[in-house]
Image (cartoon, helix red, strand yellow):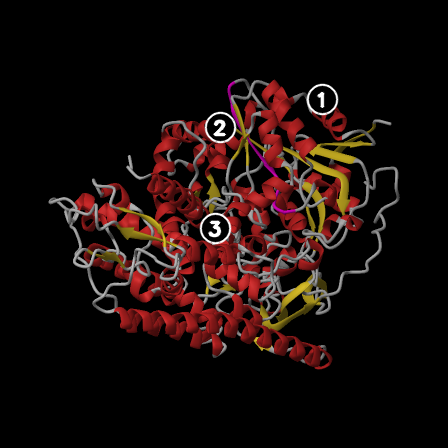
Amino acid sequence: MKSRREFIKTGLALGATFSLADLHGLFAADASPGGGAPAIPATNASRSVLIAVRDGSRTAMLDKAIAELGGMERFVKKGQTVVIKPNISFDAPPERGSNTDPELLGHVVTLCFAAGAKSVSFFDHTLDQWQRAYAASGAERVARETGAALVPGNDQSLYREVAIPRGVQLRSARVHSLVLDSDVFINVPVLKHHGGPLMSACMKNLMGVVWDRRFYHRNDLNQCIADFLTFKQPALNILDAYHPMVRNGPHGRSVDDVVEMRTLLASTDIVAIDAAGAKMLGLQPAEVGYVKLAADMKLGTMNLDNVDIRRFKLA
Amino acid sequence: MPRSRLKLLRVIAALVVFTGLTAALVDFRGLVPTALGHWLASVQLVPSLVALVTGASVSLAGIIIIGVTLAAGRVYCSAICPLGILQDVVARIVAWTRRKGTRSLPYARPWTWLRQLFLWGTVAGVAAGWSGLTLALLDPYSNFGRIAADIFRPLVTLANNAVAGLANAAGIGTLYRVEPQWTGAGALHQPAILLALLAVLVALRGRLFCNTLCPVGTFLGLLAQRAAFRLAIDKSACQKCAACLGVCKSQCINLRTSTIDFSRCVACYNCIGACQDRGIGYRFAWARQANIRPAPTAPDLQRRAFITGTAVAVAASLGTGSLLLAQVQKLRANRARGNDRDQNEPEPSNAICPPGAVSVDRFLERCTACHLCISACPTHVLQPAFLEYGIAGMMMPRLDFARSFCAYTCRTCEEVCPDGAISLLELADKQVARIGEAQFDEDKCIVKTKGTDCAACSEQCPTQAVSTVPYGRNLRLPRVNRDLCIGCGGCEYACPVLPAKAITVTGLRRHSQAQKSAEKKAVAPTPAGGFPF
């Protein structure tokens, strides 16, 4: 994990730039991540764009989606540090659909480097034992092959307490310093069923950047998931829906739980992309508690009629 | 450089065994291959004999050690036994810190009665059905295991964290911080006291522990006393310079009679190299007209002790074997008889033992609490028990679901266990080995008490024995399917309810088998081909 060096350097550099007290600095950075893409879509000014691609290989679908969004250069500027948050939480192989597919993850890393990223790191605060999850999900191999940094997510000392003033339930949280300190934050989860809020996709995936997951579960899971978005939103969300786990989620029992749909979604609007994910699982977006709450808090667009959906079939 | 080739061999063997075992036991990152720890532990006398006698494996290491001892004395005690080697390491440290150089220890008479007491005590403990705890307390390998795993491991982890901080600041990314795993005081006091005792004994009296308290040392000493080749002093060459006394850790060289008490000699071979006159060496002692005779001063006493000892040792090994076998058969019979009743009302256990242990009773009989599995466990769910199993299970590994849970795809503890206390199951069998059963108390559940979604338990459940069912207004309440539950503890660990969890796992005294789900391939929730939005 040579990447850790980069991470520490970044941490030191950024630590000097932003003091913890200066959280507004972080928000300012969020509002226009990468210097252009709107992370929090303005309510009326412009419609959110959702790219939906079907029937290609994961890499081909990703290439198409990113090209449609204006290229990775729109999100990653030369010399920037990038943190990717995949879902690599489970000690299960890629075919089980519990984790973000390694091929897709690897290709996101490659595109970031091609856009001139100084460093690309990824991590997850895993549910299963972290080394086993990193290995089984294929993330370890991706890091080795692409030169990205795979950083431990189970080390409490890497998380820093931040205030979440606009949160309803989640008023503060310890957040992984990579998320706090990197220039660009990219969310690459997998679409899955969830036994609680019915779906795990982009918003739910962000629980993995926080130290105390149990706090969420104890204090209205759906509200906490929505609250986190008031603190930080990814510059870009890429949802792996190649073979979603449609039941027994988010852990899953066997490969029988996945159904091949060969789809990839991408958007800067995390609520819109999750709303589309819900539809793919046969749900109404408002049935997923946190999607509705986030929409009510004006953190994105749940009503897909108000979203500029661009659909592509590659085959 | 040792002047004796035998000593050189002994030091090399000791370094290999000690380094390997210590690395396996302090391995806080899971870097040491499980096979190495397993192999080095399996060649230890007690684990090997336990495995052989219980039929866990055809482990011949113990037989070979006995054979070597009968041939050439207690080679085991200085070259293979990690607790013996640890004492040599402590002795080195003591020597460095002493200003006036090494202190030489004079000859001392053996404490035969105390040695016999510990040996007999061990035999009695095993015979009384307390084999696990007895061996745990007295087996030198297992004692070393606990010292290394419970004391050295967290200290090494702390050192790693200090170095990792510096290394990362310097741009080296191969190290990372690891949470140190502290053993609870209830299980920690025994290795801590023993380590302190060893340090004092080594500083004052050399290998007195090995020659007085250690039943393995005494047992092997009884054989060594009768060994075919024994170290002896060549009277014609000896100048009585006492150079050998200066290097002997066992206080077993009697220069007045020019004899070596070979039952207490730990075969370190220091004396061979120390003797300028080449006056000490192995002599064949089974010849009819042996040159070496027992010391004339107390021949009867020694002889009597030896004969009694050998008789006891033989009886002990036979007795232990038959008793253990009898117990195993009794257990099997019990299990067979209990099977019908089992299905309806399994007997609960306060402490939960790992998959592969088969039953708490079998486990407590065979486990010598060496803590190799505790060190190797990647989730750290395995923790030493205090009184959770009762007194007979003190220091034995148990699954602590407050700390973690048992990983579904993991068989590490089964792979490292040297004495078959945790049998190596096929992964498919491990994944249905039911060690406990989840109990859900919906009145404590967040979904009911707060009216918000949770499903933390189901999120963690690998078999989906814990799933959720619709509840109230767009909520999902956990539900347990007992047939599928294996008792891994994921649900209990994940449950966020304070102070008492809403879902807990009750251990099973006898493990049983869970069912595999018969669910068919999932169907697509939306029409295939297009976009459902």
Disc on the earlier residue, 3 or 1:
1
In which chain is the residue bearing label 1? A
Q: In 3D space, how far apart are the residues under numbered discs 3 and 1 (Cα atoms)?
A: 37 Å
User: Which residue matches tag 3?
Assistant: A171
Residue nearest the observer in this picture, B417 or A68? B417
Above or below, A286 against B387 in this view is above
**Mark 3 falls on what kind of element?**
loop
Q: Are marks 3 and 1 on the same chain?
A: yes
Question: Which numbered dot is residue A2?
Answer: 2
In the image, taking residue B145 as reference, residue A132 lies left or right, namely right
Circles 2 and 1: CB atoms closer than 8 Å: no
In which chain is the residue bearing label 3? A
Q: How many marks?
A: 3
Q: What is the magenta range? A: A79-91
Disc on the earlier residue, 2 or 3:
2
**Mark 2 falls on what kind of element?**
loop
User: Which residue matches tag 1?
Assistant: A67
Q: Are marks 2 and 1 on the same chain?
A: yes
Q: In x, y percent, where is residue A1?
A: 50, 31
Extreme residue toward the left, this view: B100
Q: In x, y percent, where is residue A102?
A: 67, 34
Q: In 3D space, how far apart are the residues under numbered discs 2 and 3 (Cα atoms)?
A: 35 Å
Residue nearest the observer in this picture, B387 or A234? B387
Residue nearest the observer in this picture, A308 or B493? B493
Q: Are marks 2 and 3 on the same chain?
A: yes
Identity, as a three-letter code, of the amino acid under mark 1: Ala
Magenta segment includes B430:
no
Q: In x, y percent, where is residue B327?
A: 58, 76
